[in-house]
Amino acid sequence: MPESGFLFNVSQSLGDRYWSLADADDTSVRQLSLSLGTPDFISRLLSLRGIGAGAAEGFLSPTLRETFPDPTTFKDMEKAAGLILDAIIDGKNVTVFADYDVDGGTSSALLARYFRAWERELGLYVPDRLTEGYGPSPAAFRYLKEQGADLVITVDCGAAATEALEESRTIGLPVIVIDHHLMGHEWPEVAALVNPNRPDDASGYGHLAAAGVVYVMLAALNAEARKRGIAPPTGLPNILEWLDLCALGTLCDMSPLHDANRAFVHQGLKIMARDGNPGLRALADVAGIGKIESVYHATFVLGPRLNAGGRVGDPWLAAKLLATDDRQEAIELAERLHGLNDERKAVEAHILEIATAQAERQLERDPDSHVLVVSGEGWHPGVIGIVAGRIKDRFHRPTIVIGWGDDLGPVAKGSARSVRGVNIGDAIGHAAKSGHILSGGGHAMAGGLSLRPEQIEPFSAWLNTHLSEFATERDAARELRVDALLDAGAITPETFDQIARLGPFGQGAPEPYFALTDMHVTHTRPIGANHLRLTAESSSGRVEALSWRSVGTPLGDALQGRGRFHLVGRLKCDVWNGRRRAQFELIDAAPVDTGRT
């Protein structure tokens, strides 16, 4: 709980949160305002992000020149670059083995485009989520060997695939691993293993997405080619042209946006806006957006469609789309992904409705549940992670969603999402070691597991007991910290533009939250499936606001009843008929006059 009390005395909002106002250092704010000439509220936002006057310019205008990682500091990077360049020059049969998500797809497309610049084609293999699971398998490597592969490069996977890598050595198939996931202290012998998170890597770039590691590899490949004095007929590839793929993979993999990642995304979005990638342009067209220019476009419009193939359809589609230069092929692939995304949303909505009802019943039985475990026969493993995230966000506690049966096999698969301070990956790993589930693990905020359906109930009981010691951390996850207070009259396109200078926003660099006090909600109307558009007024101005997925929730029900509310949200800018207007994207609300304190 905040030591200085609750903002507006809100200890339990309509979203079941308590509100606090972030405490900024006044001296730092003044120094920033003097050195940059920025308004106090912008200086406050910079100070809250730990940016001092000396670092502000680099933060606001990040460059690749200042932040690009030195490839030579990565363990095995130079070795891998030499082997890959040898394979390119010798015309060997090389296949990239990619994960089925956006990070894997962008990583494989970066390599495919590099090979093509040298007039070589790179083979592609993407495992099926349902039949093969995550990462390389012995069977997949045997298949690639039989198909004549001379070298396999794994991207966004492979670092923990001990059995598969041992098989590759047995059958004489060289493998280069390019990954970023956590791994153990021992691994089989491979041709090269590039992973900033391998225990003996001292590069300090463990926060890169796989696409970021691959992008650094492209720089290493160009450096190796210069050292040898060789180049393709058209000259060494200009990898800056492909920075859009690096940015997309970084954003969609939720990698923290600082240092190199911030520069990758800041500059990569500019490349993305130029429409140089036919696949991204085609996907934007079928999604109904014009210029691709924002984190929102990349993360919430393109990302879900690219992921749809791996979730409910053909896992190869995203990698193919991002690598193609054929406009017609791009259109066909984009339309297939768009259709699969619609299918994914329908499946997700159906499961979410049932899973939410289960969670509500669980909380009715035990309001102090430390974790929510919901399950259902036939629940598709491609969407249970999304559903777990939705439920976690609504009820502010760790959530595990489990599905089995219906041609998915007799073993149940679960996906977990957690709240700040509760390491769900460790808990799942402990459950696996203790025999409560068949297998599982993950990291602090997410995890996966396998278990028999009859184990679900006892596992849920065990996990609630196991996580009871984190009650304080779970309660802390209910905090909604507000960056600054705003008057309704300050919600303008000009204010939005000032705030946007602090972007790009994403993991580790959240958009600032603002509070509006004592707003009279005068009008609401549902839009889409379960969203609300509303108008709120005060003596200082009138605000148009959007509340996503709130219909049927306590928040949405209260807003539709209108009245006076304190509001918390973030600023957005909308363009309609050539006119820009600022909007307030509502995150939470609390009635002014009902004594919810």
Image (tube, rainbow, N blue to C red):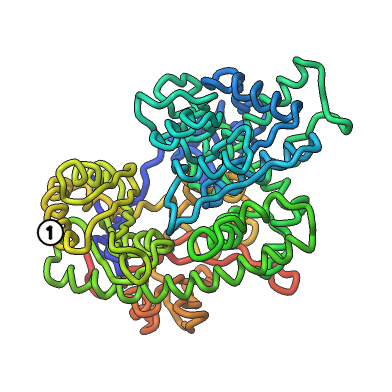
> For the image shown, how many numbered marks are present on the structure?
1
The amino acid type, in three-letter code, at marker 1 is Pro
Task: Specify the quadrant of the image occupied by residue 119.
Answer: top right
- Please name whichever residue, 515 or 312, is drawn nearer the observer in this view of the structure: 312
- Please name whichever residue, 396 or 59, is drawn nearer the observer in this view of the structure: 396
In the rendered view, does 132 fall on the left or right side of 125? left
- Please name whichever residue, 550 or 595, is drawn nearer the observer in this view of the structure: 550
- Is residue 25 in view? no
Residue at 57% across / 33% down in the picture?
213
The residue at which mark 1 appears reads as 458
- Is residue 497 in view? yes
Element under disc 1:
helix
| Residue 12 x/y as whole percent | 24, 64
Residue at 40% across / 79% down in the picture?
551
Residue at 38% across / 78% down in the picture?
559
| Residue 84 x/y as whole percent | 66, 27
Q: Quadrant of the C terminus?
A: bottom left
Residue at 42% across / 52% down in the picture?
133
Q: Compared to 36, does 132 lie above or below?
A: below
In the rendered view, does 369 fall on the left or right side of 524? left
| Residue 109 x/y as whole percent | 66, 45
| Residue 289 x/y as whole percent | 68, 66
Mark 1 surroundings within 10 Å by alpha-carbon count, few (fewer than 14), some (14 through 19), many (20 or more): few
- Please name whichever residue, 516 or 502, is drawn nearer the observer in this view of the structure: 502
In the rendered view, does 82 fall on the left or right side of 514? right
